[in-house]
Amino acid sequence: MNSKLLYLLTFMFLIFSLSVSGETAGNRIIDKKEIEASGITQLSEIFTLIPEWHTSSIDGVTWNVSPNGLEPYSYQRWKIILDDVLLDAEYWGTKPLDMIPINISQIDYIEVINIPGIYSGEFIESGALHFHTIDNNKKTTLKIEGNLANEIGDPGPYRYTEHTSPNVDRLAENIGVVFDKRINNNSLSINFKNSVHFPTDPAVRQRNTDAIDGGFPKQNLLAAGFKSNIGKLKLLGGMTSFEDIHNFFTLPAPQGLIKTYNFINTSYPINISNSIKITAKMNISRNAIKDFHNKLMIFRDQIVKSSIRIDHIRTKYRIGSEIDYKFQKHIIQLRYNPTVYYSNNINLFKTRLYFDYNLSNKITNSISFEYYKNHGPMFSTSPNRYNIKVIEKIKVKINNQHTLQLGYFMGIRYSDDINYYSPRIINDELHISPLIHILKNANVQYYLDWEFNLTKSLNGYLKYIYSYYDSYYNYKRTSSPDGKIFSSQFYLNYKNSNNLAVNFFYSLSLSKGDSQRFNDQRKENPKHTLQLSMTYEPYKNLSFWGKIKYTSSTFWIDQDTTINEMLIADVSIRKKLMKNKAAITFGLRNILNDTQRYHPSGAAFDLNYFVRFYIDVI
Amino acid sequence: MFKQIIIIFLLLFIFCSTNINAVPFDSSTIIFNFVSNINSNDFHDYWEPKTSFEFNGRTNFYSGMIELGIIYNKNKSLSIDQPDYNSIYSFVGFGFNYKISNSFSNYTGLRMGNYYMDFDDPDIHSELKSEHELYLGAISSVQYSLNKRYAFNLALEHCKIFTYKRIYLWSVSVGVAYSFDSPKWLKEFLQ
């Protein structure tokens, strides 16, 4: 055991001697209180509150994640759901969370989905974040929020002396506005946000400067969203534009790109009877990527989805099905000949079924199933591919204190990989060529989840996950990464008379690969993760939040580099003002000033600090 | 140095936390000081900090006092290789106030904030013309009451600026403090 781990365990012992820890098991809820107390300044920082998901980032802006440590960072199978709407914002293997067009103050709670199942009609097999936004009850509200943040280590005035050092820039600055209006049963919420990200590491800054031909490498994000309820009709939509500097795994240097995401969703529920409910949904979205320099289109994905879901709920059982049709127009523009482009029309029919049955007062059995088939040419390859996914789980309520849940997920996939491209640089310009790649693979996950509520204030869970992959993901598509992963997680939550909450989390992740590639990829995930976080509210208008997290070292075969273990401690203080109409949060991150790095070629973060404000103007 | 100060401060915090009886925000003090740098180190080989001005406000907050303030300061270059630069410290602080006698009181506290630097350099990229850095300060001051409202203020401050090569400054400040019952709007704002 090394000194950092010992340091962390000692710290935890001290905390636990004063208190102990808790929260719900399996899928976790990150509530508004925790989000506010921690001083989260942008959506991507939410990952700092989810220790069970491993993270990697080159620029500290776009994060790749490994939910429950089960998948490699190059394969992003997890999903983003916003108010029951699945968002298709994906850009060549990345899902920039900040592109979701909502502001931090709009979040009511976030559901971290770790257990496979059907949620909001969507089949989730490898984790999801479900953002639930607030439905405002007041007539009219107008909120303004924002933050400033900075990292230590600038040269300051010494830049003009022999003691000069590389410039370390500020962290993201955000500003946002939310307007809500309610008239009788109808409501409208409109929001706007602007985030400006600055490179914080000299190496990243130089690469990003080169990517945009010597300009100042800011990553500017503009987003606007709306949510409206007109009677039972629900509308949700948004537009985001992000001047990003994208890191391709296969290119030595990042590229300046403009990513846009526009979507609109409508849903309408019909209650046929007390027990039968039908929900109809329609979703139109458009992802696009343009070249940063000449604004020419490189990639466009237009998706139209419609679905009908039927839920039949009785005391003894719950049964439901969803039929989903997706039309996807997938276009890649060839840069060296703008008149030539690859266009693919994909028609996808999905069928989902679930059946939950109470075998007794204590035992519930659930089965979920999804099947879908592609119709339509995929580049030059032939058409009709299929996917089958099954989840079976049994929940046993042993007594009021203990619940046991066990189940498995099995997925078989035979489909074209439309996200397989070959990026190349020709005459200093980025060119994307589509490549043919067929996925034929299988994944089986078994899990056992023991949830306990030992006392009113102490609860937690112990979870074991065993996952077997047969080529389920394929990092460079040149090998078949088969193997097994075993993950064990322990979580404890303690809440004391509503003013102290302590969470403790530990995970151990082990693997055994049938191929060298699998073993190499697994080394990018830390074997041990420990996190202790605490929220303390000594007074109604004042809260303290702290977190200390240990991750063991990781090894990155492609860069032949080891990232040392990290011990990262963050603290923040939040003071409410104007009788809760405003709040100001001060925070320090990485107060131990350990080397904080999430990718061998990525930015290293030193001690940094921020101030965040929020005000209810109306 | 700072570690020792923080340990002393934490002990002070634990000691004072047992005496939570004041009503938060019921009285306020505004202070105007002239600040003069008194130490000498590597920084002073290049710049001479000129007399600066401090303006801050304090109010009682449970067992202690919170403060919010700014210090404006001009740093004169000692060579043509370095430009002059202006700096503004903006900070929040927390500390404890002790009544030593009827006329004397002591305030000891910690400050945290932002150190803004604006360089007088026309050749630099506009995005780099100014910089921000974390600043931590420890202050101890003595106040001599002239009457119920006004007091003479003398303070000693040590601060650390977290540039890559850290800047350590000691300063002495003198000025006046004016105390008053917090107006209703201020109390409502802070509550």
Image (tube, coloured by chain):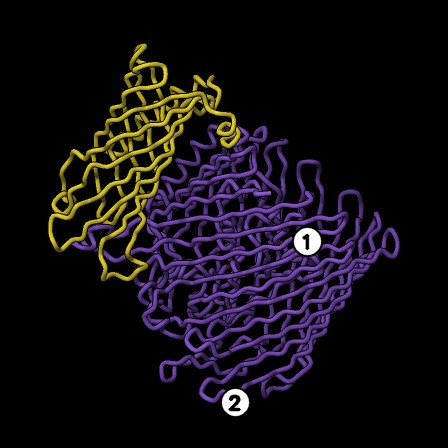
* Residue A47 seen: no
| Tally of marks | 2
Q: Nearer the viewer, residue B11 or B105?
A: B105
For the residues marked 1 and 2, what is the alpha-carbon distance in whole angstroms?
Answer: 42 Å
The answer to whether residue B35 is left or right of residue B70 is left
Chain identifier of the yellow chain: B
Q: Nearer the viewer, residue B137 or A618?
A: A618
Display colour for chain A: purple
Which of pointers 1 and 2 indicates the residue nearer the eye? Answer: 1
Q: Nearer the viewer, residue A77 or B36?
A: B36
Residue A339 tag number: 2
Q: Secondary structure at mark 1?
A: strand
Sequence-wise first label, 1 or 2: 1
From this viewpoint, which residue is outermost toward the top?
Answer: B102
Judging from the image, mark 1 belongs to the subunit labelled A
The answer to whether residue A186 is left or right of residue A618 is right
Q: Position of residue A269 (x, y in %)?
A: 79, 58
Q: Are marks 1 and 2 on the same chain?
A: yes
The quadrant of the image that shows the C terminus of chain A is top right
Judging from the image, mark 2 belongs to the subunit labelled A
Q: Residues within 10 Å of mark 1 (few under 14, many from 20)?
A: some
- Disc 2 marks a residue whose amino acid type is Thr
Disc 1: which residue: A188
From this viewpoint, which residue is outermost toward the right?
Answer: A273
Q: Position of residue B71 (x, y in %)?
A: 29, 37
Residue A296 tag number: none
* Residue A598 seen: yes
- Disc 1 marks a residue whose amino acid type is Leu
Q: Secondary structure at mark 2?
A: loop
Q: Position of residue A217 (x, y in %)?
A: 37, 65
Q: Nearer the viewer, residue B22 or A168?
A: B22
